[in-house]
Protein backbone atom coordinates (compact mmCIF):
# COMPACT_ATOMS: atom_id res chain seq x y z
CA UNK A 1 0.00 0.00 0.00
CA UNK A 2 1.23 3.47 -0.86
CA UNK A 3 0.37 6.05 1.79
CA UNK A 4 0.82 8.92 -0.65
CA UNK A 5 -1.41 7.34 -3.31
CA UNK A 6 -4.13 6.65 -0.72
CA UNK A 7 -4.22 10.21 0.59
CA UNK A 8 -7.20 12.37 -0.34
CA UNK A 9 -6.38 15.58 -2.20
CA UNK A 10 -6.03 18.63 -0.01
CA UNK A 11 -9.05 20.94 -0.30
CA UNK A 12 -8.74 24.29 -1.99
CA UNK A 13 -11.45 26.27 -0.14
CA UNK A 14 -10.22 28.99 2.15
CA UNK A 15 -12.61 28.20 4.98
CA UNK A 16 -10.99 25.93 7.57
CA UNK A 17 -14.28 24.34 8.55
CA UNK A 18 -15.00 23.56 4.91
CA UNK A 19 -11.56 22.00 4.53
CA UNK A 20 -12.11 19.85 7.62
CA UNK A 21 -15.50 18.68 6.36
CA UNK A 22 -14.02 17.78 2.98
CA UNK A 23 -11.19 15.81 4.55
CA UNK A 24 -13.64 13.71 6.61
CA UNK A 25 -16.24 13.50 3.81
CA UNK A 26 -19.03 15.23 5.77
CA UNK A 27 -21.41 18.10 5.03
CA UNK A 28 -20.05 20.45 7.66
CA UNK A 29 -17.68 20.81 10.61
CA UNK A 30 -17.13 22.93 13.68
CA UNK A 31 -14.04 24.00 15.62
CA UNK A 32 -14.36 24.05 19.42
CA UNK A 33 -12.11 24.94 22.35
CA UNK A 34 -10.65 21.43 22.88
CA UNK A 35 -11.01 17.77 22.05
CA UNK A 36 -13.06 17.21 25.20
CA UNK A 37 -15.29 20.16 24.30
CA UNK A 38 -15.97 18.39 21.02
CA UNK A 39 -16.82 15.14 22.82
CA UNK A 40 -19.01 16.78 25.46
CA UNK A 41 -20.95 19.09 23.16
CA UNK A 42 -21.57 16.27 20.68
CA UNK A 43 -22.85 13.92 23.36
CA UNK A 44 -25.27 16.40 24.91
CA UNK A 45 -26.45 17.36 21.43
CA UNK A 46 -27.31 13.81 20.40
CA UNK A 47 -28.48 12.36 23.73
CA UNK A 48 -31.40 13.26 25.98
CA UNK A 49 -32.32 12.25 29.57
CA UNK A 50 -33.50 8.65 29.49
CA UNK A 51 -31.34 7.71 26.50
CA UNK A 52 -28.74 4.95 26.51
CA UNK A 53 -25.19 5.24 25.16
CA UNK A 54 -23.29 2.18 23.96
CA UNK A 55 -19.54 2.75 23.96
CA UNK A 56 -16.27 0.89 23.55
CA UNK A 57 -14.28 0.31 26.74
CA UNK A 58 -11.17 1.47 24.93
CA UNK A 59 -11.29 5.19 25.62
CA UNK A 60 -8.92 7.96 26.58
CA UNK A 61 -9.20 8.66 30.34
CA UNK A 62 -10.86 12.07 29.95
CA UNK A 63 -13.63 10.69 27.74
CA UNK A 64 -14.19 7.73 30.03
CA UNK A 65 -14.58 10.02 33.06
CA UNK A 66 -17.12 12.12 31.19
CA UNK A 67 -19.12 9.02 30.23
CA UNK A 68 -18.91 7.48 33.71
CA UNK A 69 -19.75 10.57 35.75
CA UNK A 70 -21.16 13.46 33.75
CA UNK A 71 -23.56 11.72 31.39
CA UNK A 72 -25.29 9.71 34.16
CA UNK A 73 -25.79 12.96 36.08
CA UNK A 74 -27.64 14.23 32.99
CA UNK A 75 -29.90 11.18 32.97
CA UNK A 76 -28.04 9.19 30.28
CA UNK A 77 -27.34 5.52 30.90
CA UNK A 78 -23.96 4.28 29.63
CA UNK A 79 -22.79 0.72 28.85
CA UNK A 80 -19.14 -0.10 28.14
CA UNK A 81 -18.47 -2.93 25.67
CA UNK A 82 -15.32 -4.95 25.08
CA UNK A 83 -14.86 -4.34 21.34
CA UNK A 84 -13.04 -7.65 20.87
CA UNK A 85 -16.36 -9.41 21.64
CA UNK A 86 -18.28 -8.50 18.51
CA UNK A 87 -21.56 -9.91 19.84
CA UNK A 88 -21.20 -7.76 22.95
CA UNK A 89 -22.52 -4.73 21.10
CA UNK A 90 -25.87 -6.39 20.42
CA UNK A 91 -26.08 -7.99 23.88
CA UNK A 92 -25.68 -4.57 25.51
CA UNK A 93 -28.52 -2.92 23.59
CA UNK A 94 -31.55 -1.57 25.42
CA UNK A 95 -34.85 -0.16 24.19
CA UNK A 96 -33.47 3.34 24.79
CA UNK A 97 -30.11 2.95 23.02
CA UNK A 98 -29.64 5.98 20.79
CA UNK A 99 -25.93 6.23 20.05
CA UNK A 100 -22.79 4.13 19.66
CA UNK A 101 -19.39 5.66 20.38
CA UNK A 102 -15.88 4.41 19.75
CA UNK A 103 -12.30 5.65 19.57
CA UNK A 104 -9.92 4.25 16.97
CA UNK A 105 -6.95 4.08 17.04
CA UNK A 106 -6.78 3.94 20.84
CA UNK A 107 -4.13 5.80 22.83
CA UNK A 108 -1.79 4.44 24.12
CA UNK A 109 -2.53 0.81 23.26
CA UNK A 110 -2.64 1.45 19.48
CA UNK A 111 -5.60 -0.95 19.26
CA UNK A 112 -7.94 -0.59 16.29
CA UNK A 113 -11.67 -1.13 16.74
CA UNK A 114 -13.37 -3.25 14.08
CA UNK A 115 -16.22 -1.01 12.90
CA UNK A 116 -17.99 -3.65 10.82
CA UNK A 117 -20.26 -5.14 13.52
CA UNK A 118 -20.92 -1.68 14.95
CA UNK A 119 -21.81 -0.27 11.53
CA UNK A 120 -24.21 -3.16 10.87
CA UNK A 121 -25.92 -2.66 14.21
CA UNK A 122 -26.20 1.12 13.85
CA UNK A 123 -27.61 0.92 10.34
CA UNK A 124 -30.06 -1.84 11.26
CA UNK A 125 -31.49 0.03 14.25
CA UNK A 126 -31.04 3.63 13.12
CA UNK A 127 -28.50 4.48 15.82
CA UNK A 128 -26.06 7.37 15.53
CA UNK A 129 -22.44 6.23 15.25
CA UNK A 130 -19.78 8.64 16.56
CA UNK A 131 -16.05 7.95 16.10
CA UNK A 132 -13.07 9.74 17.63
CA UNK A 133 -10.37 9.32 14.97
CA UNK A 134 -7.82 11.74 16.44
CA UNK A 135 -4.83 9.40 16.22
CA UNK A 136 -5.46 8.47 12.60
CA UNK A 137 -6.23 11.89 11.13
CA UNK A 138 -8.36 12.01 7.97
CA UNK A 139 -5.28 11.11 5.94
CA UNK A 140 -5.17 7.59 7.36
CA UNK A 141 -8.79 6.88 8.27
CA UNK A 142 -12.12 8.43 7.32
CA UNK A 143 -14.80 6.83 9.54
CA UNK A 144 -17.72 8.15 7.46
CA UNK A 145 -16.58 5.84 4.66
CA UNK A 146 -17.10 2.96 7.12
CA UNK A 147 -20.52 3.91 8.44
CA UNK A 148 -19.90 6.70 10.97
CA UNK A 149 -22.29 9.64 11.21
CA UNK A 150 -20.07 11.98 13.22
CA UNK A 151 -16.26 12.21 13.44
CA UNK A 152 -14.36 13.86 16.28
CA UNK A 153 -10.77 15.08 16.51
CA UNK A 154 -8.58 16.59 19.17
CA UNK A 155 -7.18 19.10 16.71
CA UNK A 156 -4.08 19.88 18.77
CA UNK A 157 -2.70 16.52 17.59
CA UNK A 158 -2.21 15.73 13.90
CA UNK A 159 -4.51 18.39 12.44
CA UNK A 160 -2.48 21.21 13.99
CA UNK A 161 0.76 19.26 14.18
CA UNK A 162 2.86 22.14 15.48
CA UNK A 163 1.74 22.45 19.11
CA UNK A 164 0.31 25.92 18.56
CA UNK A 165 -2.75 25.55 20.77
CA UNK A 166 -5.78 23.54 21.77
CA UNK A 167 -8.85 22.90 19.65
CA UNK A 168 -11.41 20.22 18.94
CA UNK A 169 -13.27 19.40 15.74
CA UNK A 170 -16.68 17.86 15.07
CA UNK A 171 -17.52 16.74 11.53
CA UNK A 172 -21.04 15.67 10.55
CA UNK A 173 -24.26 16.68 8.87
CA UNK A 174 -25.42 20.29 8.77
CA UNK A 175 -28.17 19.47 11.28
CA UNK A 176 -25.78 17.88 13.78
CA UNK A 177 -23.26 20.70 13.49
CA UNK A 178 -25.99 23.29 14.07
CA UNK A 179 -27.01 21.49 17.27
CA UNK A 180 -23.42 21.13 18.46
CA UNK A 181 -22.79 24.81 17.77
CA UNK A 182 -25.73 25.74 20.01
CA UNK A 183 -24.33 23.64 22.84
CA UNK A 184 -20.85 25.08 22.28
CA UNK A 185 -22.17 28.59 22.64
CA UNK A 186 -24.30 27.71 25.67
CA UNK A 187 -21.40 26.05 27.46
CA UNK A 188 -18.80 28.65 26.55
CA UNK A 189 -16.76 26.13 24.55
CA UNK A 190 -15.88 28.45 21.67
CA UNK A 191 -12.31 28.11 20.39
CA UNK A 192 -9.52 30.60 20.92
CA UNK A 193 -9.68 33.34 18.24
CA UNK A 194 -6.40 32.06 16.75
CA UNK A 195 -7.47 28.40 16.65
CA UNK A 196 -8.66 28.39 13.04
CA UNK A 197 -5.55 30.26 11.95
CA UNK A 198 -3.37 27.60 13.57
CA UNK A 199 -5.43 24.85 11.97
CA UNK A 200 -5.18 26.52 8.58
CA UNK A 201 -1.39 26.34 8.79
CA UNK A 202 -1.50 22.75 10.01
CA UNK A 203 -3.81 21.59 7.24
CA UNK A 204 -1.44 22.90 4.58
CA UNK A 205 1.17 20.33 5.63
CA UNK A 206 -1.11 17.59 6.99
CA UNK A 207 -0.78 15.12 4.11
CA UNK A 208 2.99 15.55 3.87
CA UNK A 209 3.52 15.25 7.63
CA UNK A 210 1.32 12.20 8.10
CA UNK A 211 2.78 10.48 5.03
CA UNK A 212 6.29 10.94 6.43
CA UNK A 213 5.23 9.73 9.88
CA UNK A 214 3.57 6.64 8.39
CA UNK A 215 6.72 5.68 6.51
CA UNK A 216 9.19 6.42 9.30
CA UNK A 217 7.16 4.75 12.05
CA UNK A 218 6.84 1.58 9.96
CA UNK A 219 10.62 1.38 9.54
CA UNK A 220 11.22 2.04 13.25
CA UNK A 221 8.61 -0.51 14.34
CA UNK A 222 10.10 -3.18 12.09
CA UNK A 223 13.55 -2.45 13.53
CA UNK A 224 12.26 -2.72 17.12
CA UNK A 225 10.50 -6.00 16.30
CA UNK A 226 13.73 -7.41 14.81
CA UNK A 227 15.70 -6.15 17.84
CA UNK A 228 13.26 -7.96 20.15
CA UNK A 229 14.01 -11.29 18.45
CA UNK A 230 17.71 -11.05 19.25
CA UNK A 231 17.71 -9.08 22.50
CA UNK A 232 15.49 -10.03 25.41
CA UNK A 233 15.44 -6.48 26.76
CA UNK A 234 12.44 -5.75 24.52
CA UNK A 235 9.42 -7.98 25.02
CA UNK A 236 7.22 -6.62 22.25
CA UNK A 237 6.30 -3.66 20.08
CA UNK A 238 2.71 -2.73 19.31
CA UNK A 239 2.23 -0.97 15.97
CA UNK A 240 -0.81 -1.54 13.69
CA UNK A 241 1.39 -1.88 10.62
CA UNK A 242 3.11 -4.99 11.96
CA UNK A 243 1.53 -8.39 11.19
CA UNK A 244 2.02 -9.26 14.87
CA UNK A 245 -0.39 -6.51 15.96
CA UNK A 246 -3.74 -8.02 17.06
CA UNK A 247 -5.69 -5.64 14.82
CA UNK A 248 -3.38 -5.59 11.81
CA UNK A 249 -5.93 -7.17 9.46
CA UNK A 250 -8.59 -4.59 10.36
CA UNK A 251 -6.13 -1.71 9.99
CA UNK A 252 -4.91 -3.02 6.63
CA UNK A 253 -8.48 -3.12 5.32
CA UNK A 254 -9.72 0.23 6.65
CA UNK A 255 -6.67 2.49 6.99
CA UNK A 256 -4.58 4.24 4.36
CA UNK A 257 -1.57 4.39 6.71
CA UNK A 258 -0.71 3.19 10.19
CA UNK A 259 0.27 6.45 11.88
CA UNK A 260 3.18 7.53 14.02
CA UNK A 261 2.29 5.99 17.39
CA UNK A 262 3.70 2.78 18.85
CA UNK A 263 4.29 1.27 22.27
CA UNK A 264 7.26 -0.85 23.38
CA UNK A 265 7.25 -3.17 26.39
CA UNK A 266 10.54 -3.78 28.19
CA UNK A 267 11.46 -6.98 30.04
CA UNK A 268 12.71 -5.27 33.21
CA UNK A 269 9.66 -3.10 33.77
CA UNK A 270 9.43 0.45 35.02
CA UNK A 271 13.05 0.67 36.11
CA UNK A 272 14.17 -0.16 32.58
CA UNK A 273 11.76 2.44 31.19
CA UNK A 274 13.26 5.16 33.38
CA UNK A 275 16.78 4.15 32.33
CA UNK A 276 15.88 4.05 28.65
CA UNK A 277 14.18 7.44 28.70
CA UNK A 278 17.23 8.89 30.40
CA UNK A 279 19.46 7.71 27.56
CA UNK A 280 17.41 8.96 24.63
CA UNK A 281 18.90 11.93 22.82
CA UNK A 282 16.82 12.45 19.67
CA UNK A 283 13.38 11.69 21.13
CA UNK A 284 12.05 14.45 23.35
CA UNK A 285 11.13 12.86 26.67
CA UNK A 286 7.89 14.06 28.24
CA UNK A 287 5.55 12.79 30.91
CA UNK A 288 2.30 11.26 29.70
CA UNK A 289 0.23 14.40 30.29
CA UNK A 290 2.59 16.70 28.40
CA UNK A 291 2.88 14.11 25.63
CA UNK A 292 -0.86 14.19 25.06
CA UNK A 293 -0.41 16.40 21.98
CA UNK A 294 0.53 13.55 19.72
CA UNK A 295 1.18 13.79 16.02
CA UNK A 296 3.50 16.78 16.03
CA UNK A 297 6.70 17.36 14.10
CA UNK A 298 8.84 16.29 17.06
CA UNK A 299 9.49 12.68 18.01
CA UNK A 300 8.39 12.16 21.61
CA UNK A 301 8.87 9.35 24.13
CA UNK A 302 6.94 8.96 27.37
CA UNK A 303 6.54 6.34 30.08
CA UNK A 304 3.48 4.10 30.24
CA UNK A 305 2.37 1.75 33.03
CA UNK A 306 3.53 -1.86 33.14
CA UNK A 307 7.04 -1.29 31.86
CA UNK A 308 6.18 0.22 28.49
CA UNK A 309 7.05 3.39 26.63
CA UNK A 310 5.04 5.28 24.05
CA UNK A 311 6.87 6.55 20.99
CA UNK A 312 5.32 9.20 18.83
CA UNK A 313 7.32 9.47 15.61
CA UNK A 314 7.65 12.97 14.21
CA UNK A 315 9.49 14.18 11.14
CA UNK A 316 12.95 12.86 12.05
CA UNK A 317 14.59 10.41 9.67
CA UNK A 318 14.16 6.74 10.53
CA UNK A 319 17.93 6.25 10.70
CA UNK A 320 18.22 9.00 13.30
CA UNK A 321 15.55 7.48 15.53
CA UNK A 322 16.86 3.94 15.13
CA UNK A 323 20.35 5.14 16.04
CA UNK A 324 18.96 6.78 19.16
CA UNK A 325 17.05 3.64 20.19
CA UNK A 326 20.10 1.47 19.48
CA UNK A 327 22.39 3.43 21.80
CA UNK A 328 19.69 3.66 24.47
CA UNK A 329 18.79 -0.04 24.42
CA UNK A 330 22.27 -1.48 24.07
Image (spheres, helix red, strand yellow):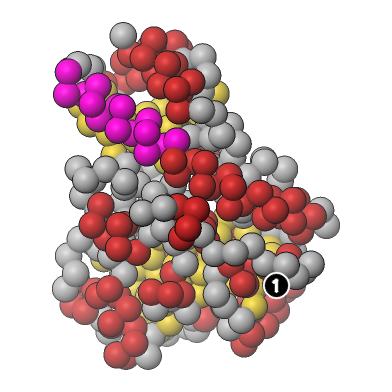
Q: According to the image, label 1 marks what residue?
A: 18
Q: In this rendering, does residue 2 appear at all?
A: yes
Please state which of residues 310 and 211 is positioned toward the viewer in this rendering. 211
Reply yes or no: does residue 135 show up in magenta: no
- Residue at x-position 72% and y-position 67%: 12
Q: Position of residue 314 (x, y in %)?
A: 54, 35
Tell me where the magenta segment starts and ends, as one range.
Answer: 216-230
Q: Position of residue 59 (x, y in %)?
A: 39, 55
Q: Quadrant of residue 324?
A: top left
Q: Quadrant of residue 327?
A: top left
154 horizontally vs 111: left or right:
right
Quadrant assignment for the C terminus:
top left
The kind of secondary structure the magenta stretch mainly shows is: helix
- Residue at x-position 17% and y-position 18%: 230
309 horizontally vs 183: left or right:
left
Please state which of residues 40 and 38 is positioned toward the viewer in this rendering. 38
Label 1, residues with CA under 10 Å away: few <14, some 14-19, many ≥20: some
Please state which of residues 60 and 94 is positioned toward the viewer in this rendering. 60
- Residue at x-position 31% and y-position 70%: 115
Tell which residue pokes out farthest to the right in this image.
193
Q: In this rendering, does residue 136 appear at all?
A: no
Q: Is residue 278 above or below residue 27?
A: above
Reply yes or no: does residue 219 show up in magenta: yes
Q: Position of residue 241 (x, y in %)?
A: 31, 46
Amino acid sequence: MSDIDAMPPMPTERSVVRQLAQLDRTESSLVLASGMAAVACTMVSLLRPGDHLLTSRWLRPETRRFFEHELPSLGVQVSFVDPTETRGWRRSLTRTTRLVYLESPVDPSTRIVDMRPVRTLAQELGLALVVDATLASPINFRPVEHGADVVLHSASAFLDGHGNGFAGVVCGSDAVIDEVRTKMQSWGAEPHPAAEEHLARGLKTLAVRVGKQNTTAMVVAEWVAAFATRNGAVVSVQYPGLPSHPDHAVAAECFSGYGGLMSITLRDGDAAVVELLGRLQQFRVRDAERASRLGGVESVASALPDGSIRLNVGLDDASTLIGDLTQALE
